[in-house]
Image (tube, rainbow, N blue to C red):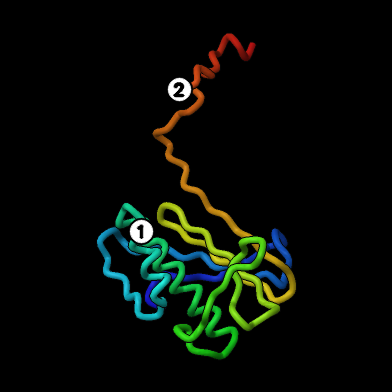
């Protein structure tokens, strides 16, 4: 894997049968090798308006393919994805493995389990957006007394 990918230690925060990886996004403008992605994934990446969003999608999807390929002993490019009746991503013709991907800012997260359904989420928090102040929710020191 060309990207910086590291498996996270659960430290008891999630079940032992769930593996979670952190994907550090490459710097803006980095060329991403999309050879492992299928045509639908390449098309979806191109639908993102911002180049950074395209990169985040392509990188996390490529790493997901590599991780699943390693786990299943198959070539990452040969994996075919489908969507369940509930909208969850799944591997076509390979039951019993659950995975989920999230990406935002400089980070991606991938969760995989062969024992339970998994979901994961990461969200960039823009420190310059003070929504409380914009909504008039600023708390003065007097209000706290």
> How many circles with numbers are drawn on the protein?
2
Give the SS element for disc 2: helix
Please provide percent x and percent y for residue 15. Answer: 73, 66
* Residue identifier under label 2: 134
Q: Is residue 10 above or below residue 90?
A: above
Q: 142 or 134: which is nearer to us?
A: 134
Residue at 68% in and 62% down: 11
Q: Which mark is residue 3?
A: none
* Residue identifier under label 1: 47
Extreme residue in the front direction: 85
Please provide percent x and percent y for residue 133. Answer: 47, 21
Side (left or right) of 122 relative to 1 = right
The N terminus: image quadrant: bottom left
Whether residue 51 is visible, yes or no, is yes
Q: How many residues crowd mark 2 within 10 Å: few (<14), some (14–19), many (20+)?
A: few
Q: Is residue 138 above or below residue 27?
A: above
Please provide percent x and percent y for residue 12. Answer: 72, 62
Q: Earlier in the sequence, mark 1 or mark 2?
A: 1
Camera-nearest label, 1 or 2 = 1
Side (left or right) of 89 relative to 128 = right
Residue at 59% in and 84% down: 71
Q: Quadrant of residue 101?
A: bottom right
Q: How many residues crowd mark 1 within 10 Å: few (<14), some (14–19), many (20+)?
A: few
Please provide percent x and percent y for residue 121. Answer: 57, 55
Give the SS element for disc 1: helix
Q: CA distance from mark 1 to mark 2?
A: 31 Å
Residue at 67% in and 72% down: 113
Residue at 66% in and 65% down: 85
Whether residue 8 is visible, yes or no, is no
Side (left or right) of 133 relative to 16 = left
Instruction: Mark 1 and mark 2 in contact? Answer it, CB < 8 Å.
Output: no
């Amino acid at each position: 894997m060309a990207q910086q990918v590291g498996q996270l230690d659960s430290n008891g925060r999630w079940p032992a049968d769930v593996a979670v990886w952190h994907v550090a996004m490459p710097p803006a403008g980095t060329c991403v090798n999309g050879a492992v992605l299928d045509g639908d994934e390449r098309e979806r990446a191109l639908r993102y308006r911002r180049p950074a969003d395209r990169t985040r999608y392509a990188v996390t999807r490529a790493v997901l393919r590599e991780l699943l390929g390693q786990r299943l002993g198959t070539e990452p490019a040969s994996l075919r994805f489908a969507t369940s009746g509930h909208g969850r991503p799944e591997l076509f013709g390979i039951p019993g493995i659950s995975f989920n991907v999230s990406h935002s800012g400089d980070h991606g997260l991938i969760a995989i389990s062969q024992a339970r359904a998994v979901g994961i989420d990461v969200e960039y928090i823009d420190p310059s957006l003070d929504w409380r102040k914009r909504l008039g929710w600023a708390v003065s020191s007097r209000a706290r007394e």
